[in-house]
Amino acid sequence: MDALIEAMMSKAKVTGLSLAILHDGKIVKAKGYGMADKDSHKPVTADTLFQAASISKPVAALGALRLVEQKVLSLDADVNTVLKKWKVPENEFTKEKKVTLRGILSHSAGINGDHFDGYEDGKPVPELMEVLNGKKPANSPPIRVGCVPGSEWRYSGGGYVVLQQMMLDTTQKPFPSFMAETVLGPLGMTSSTYEQPLPAAKAALAATGHYADGTAVNGRWHIYPEMAAAGLWTTATDLARFVLGVNQAFAGESQSVISKATARQMLTVQRDDDGLGLFLAGKGEILQFYHTGRNEGFDAYVIGCTYKAQGIAILINANDSSGLLGDLAREIAVMYGW
């Protein structure tokens, strides 16, 4: 497997890669390959931090579903009933249908903002309210409803920014602190953090992002105040623990974050093969859940199988369009006889 991974990385010109494999409920492999930073030739290890990019969303979804279980949030109520400092602006699309948490988690709330570019280190970084309103120094348009909620599937990082504000308003805690206490800690994801910018101690463990041509991202990485949508720093091992946590909740073996009933709902199709925070494939005993991610200089992939406690997490400090992550996951599945 190591020789295969190194050959695939060389062909795709990927700088560094971190891998974790979950098999029969145990993390059986956790290893780094290549370089965390080209200039210093620092190697990737199992402890190297990468940006999870959009895989931040399903992890954040667990925190939101925990609040649903505590009856702090509702899946089907108008989100404006809990938003305090900012409200989803009403328009012609929201006259009869309102934005709900279920819609946000399943990308069917009609909210714009499919992705975010982040902010270079040393340049102004907006507050969350400025991102929501699209005001400088935010580099993204205001978060608005662009079609009737529930009428179509529309990938929306903007919806998760709204979710972040909902969680701030209802918990009265900084988003990174709430997620650390409610999700990351209970799942054993102790290396992970939503803190933006990254604290100095963790920055020393972080990989440098690289574009497709191999050049490094200015300042090593971008800062993402859109934490729920794109702000998670993590390791492949911690993402494997996330998969295991979802597996265990689905099987009723653990309620450290959410119950079996909520996990079953999370992994039930809501719209267009999308559950609540995770994409779904297959049915019955081969039901799989997965998510991908891309930030400036980082790509990520995670997949799990609901009934067999199997999964793969792959993180790279490169933007790759060769299909490396999916191809590698398929090769690993063959090697393990999945």
Image: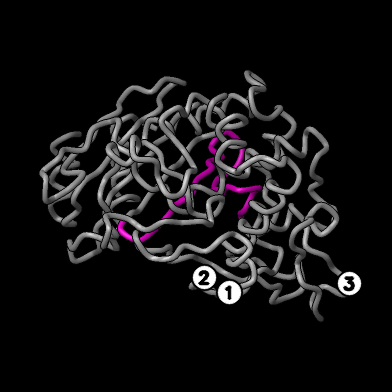
* In-image side of 118 versus 15 (left or right): right
Foreground pick, 312 / 184 = 184
Foreground pick, 69 / 246 = 69
Residue 176 sits above or below residue 124 on the image: above
Label 2, label 1: how many angstroms apart (C-alpha)?
Answer: 5 Å
Q: Residue at x 82, y 59 (%)?
A: 80
What residue is shown with label 2?
138
Residue 141 sits above or below residue 181 on the image: below
SS for callout 1 = loop
| Mark 3 Cα-neighbour bin, 10 Å: few <14, some 14–19, many ≥20 | few
Q: Position of residue 61 (x, y in %)?
A: 62, 44
What residue is shown with label 1?
135
Q: Where is residue 338 in the image (x, y as percent from the top left)?
A: 39, 32
Q: Do the residues labelled 2 and 1 touch (CB within 8 Å)?
A: yes
Label 2, label 3: how many angstroms apart (C-alpha)?
Answer: 30 Å
Q: Residue at x 20, y 53 (%)?
A: 14
Q: Which residue is situated farthest in the bottom direction here?
A: 92
SS for callout 2 = loop
Q: Which of marks 3 and 1 is nearer the N terminus?
A: 3
Type of amino acid at the residue the image marks with label 3: Glu
Q: Where is residue 211 in the image (x, y as percent from the top left)?
A: 25, 63
Foreground pick, 174 / 233 = 174
**The N terminus appears in which quarter of the rendering?**
top left
Type of amino acid at the residue the image marks with label 1: Lys
Depth check, mark 3 against mark 1: the one in front is: 1
In the image, which residues are magenta?
Answer: 273-297
SS for callout 3 = loop
Residue 201 sits above or below residue 251 on the image: below
* In-image side of 193 versus 67 (left or right): left
Foreground pick, 206 / 276 = 206
Q: Which residue is drawn at 78% across and 56% down?
A: 83
